[in-house]
Amino acid sequence: MSKDSGKKGKVGGSLKWLFGYLRPYRAIFIPSLIALFVTAALSLVFPLLLKDLIGDPADALRGKVDPSEIKERLDGSLKWLVAALSLQAFIAFWRVLGFMKSGEAALNDLRRDLFSHMLHLPVSFFQEQRSGALSTRVAADLGVVRETLMTTVPQAVRQLVILVGGLSAVFFFSWKLALIMLGSIPVVVLAVAVFGRKVRARSKDAQDALADAGTVIEESVQSITDVKSFGNEAYEESRYSRALDRFFSVTMKGALARAFFLSFIIFVMFGTIAFVAWCGARMLVNGDIDNDNFVAFILFSIFVGASLGSFPEIISQLQAMSGASERVREILQDEAEASGGEDAGSLTGSLAFEGVHFRYPSRPEQQVIEGLDLSVEPGQRVALVGPSGAGKSTLFSLILGFHRPGEGKVTFDGRDATSLDLQSLRSQIAVVPQEVLLFGGTILENIEYGRPGAGKDEIEAAAREANAHEFIEALPEGYDTVVGPRGVKISGGQRQRIAIARAILSDARFLLLDEATSALDTESERLVNEALERLMKGRTSLVIAHRLSTVRHADRILVLNHGQLVESGTHDELMAKQGTYRLLAETQLA
């Protein structure tokens, strides 16, 4: 069910979209909303009873009423006042609890929807985003939405009830003075329209600037070894300082608009109240209004003025929420990866590219893969070689369905990949990259990622086959050792073997290996190669090769250049041709 409605950027549309998430919790939210109306209405009892506490003693001083009678009425007013406040406090307790429960539950649903949708967005979306900006922006935007739902919306409802009730009261006590007071409202409405638009724009700019600052932190922390290796601490400090300066500048522009708006409203509102009080005092002197009605009018006017005075801040927050929710809705509206299709079933392991052409969406002018035809038999070990930019990594992206060919098709067991369910297809493909980035949890959790829910015995068996069990057991905490962010607490060779154990546990039919031994010491390379040999046995394997030793053991070598398959064969066959492969073997692969 779509929860998006209303025109983008409009407060009404944003609130309608937000309330869509509250709908499942209406059994809690609606009673809380009713309680909010009740407590707001009870607030209006306060000036009504306060009028008696102020007006009656004044009558007694003028000798109009017997003092003992006044005291009795004062005691009665105080009792009613305490009773009203007690009832208001009791209802407010349950109202706040209900709003928090329904609001937090709705926000959790929004967070789940957003995270789930982001996980199903195509890889191209994340390639166009800076991860730090994306995560910071989402966190900041949801923070604004939460503040609006938990604080601003209840406050807006409360102040609206007080405003309507207060206006009704002032008209009741003196319609002439009420009309004078209402003369300021058109001015306020015009100011809201003009300044509200500026506040919303500045708020959105501030969110973007804050996201940029967050990106600098995330990138610096993730690449801290490079930062320190190059001695660029001062450079990163300067980069972050510039981002903060931009955020501060944008924020101050927004603050200037809000401050001017608020000060203008305060001047108009309280100036109007002062003018009304002056007019009322003259009417009291002329006998056009009695003392009780005048006191009541002034008290209710103060409530109305305070209520109107709170609306600029409420509207500013709603405008900020509109900008924040617009960014969240933009993500939710981005098209997810194509889902559905038939279940891939149990694939035998054959793979083919048939007339495949491909250009990256971000670089449409550059042909990356051009008219590629190739086939791989089940269980075959194929090495991909070629100069940088030849299209080797792009082939992996097409196999994994990260991108779709512009022309031609990729087939598995003769079936077009576009007709297969992506999740069921990817469950039969395992990847071991050249640079392994582990999750920040334990070794056990990182291996289990290959098949969530696998037992401890199965995980240990996979680790043994990957030559990882021995070093894991030697660690003080064994499989419960926390590897740290991106696996920084263990060596490169150890990370590679954990990645291989993960691939072994997944028991996939297809293996995509970006040769992982080029940066390892001799012993680590031997252990990793042994593990890879076990992993590739009986599986269809495609290896991006960087070393001649890997190429020699391949059943078939595919030589790519400028996105085209220029040579294919075994090592000996291709060396005899004295073509591109021989040149690579004597230079790049040597």
Image (cartoon, rainbow, N blue to C red):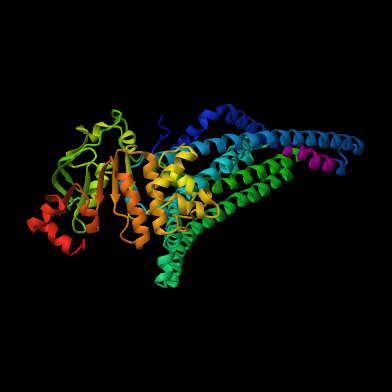
**In this orientation, does residue 265 appear?**
yes
**259 relative to 371 in the view: left or right:** right
Q: Is residue 217 magenta?
A: no
Q: Is residue 505 left or right of residue 583?
A: right
Residue 365 locus on image (x, y percent): 17, 52
Quarter occupied by residue 39: top right
Quarter of the image that includes the N terminus: top left
Q: Which residue in the rendered view is the most extreme toward the top?
A: 27
**Residue at x 83% of width, y 34% of height:** 79
- Residue 222 lies, with reference to residue 194, above or below; the image says below
**In which quadrant will I find the C terminus?**
bottom left
The image quarter containing residue 346 is: top left
User: At which x and y percent is residue 442?
Assistant: 50, 49
Can residue 325 be seen by looking at this rendering? no
In this rendering, the answer to whether 75 lies above or below 367 is above
Magenta residues, start to end: 46-59
Q: Is residue 77 left or right of residue 442?
A: right
Tell me which residue sits at (50%, 51%) in the image: 473
Residue 421 in picture, x, y percent from top left: 30, 32
Please name whichever residue, 222 or 568, is drawn nearer the observer in this view of the structure: 568
Viewer-closest of 466 and 249: 466
Q: Is residue 563 left or right of residue 173?
A: left
Position of residue 388 measured from the top left corner of the image (x, y, whole percent):
21, 59
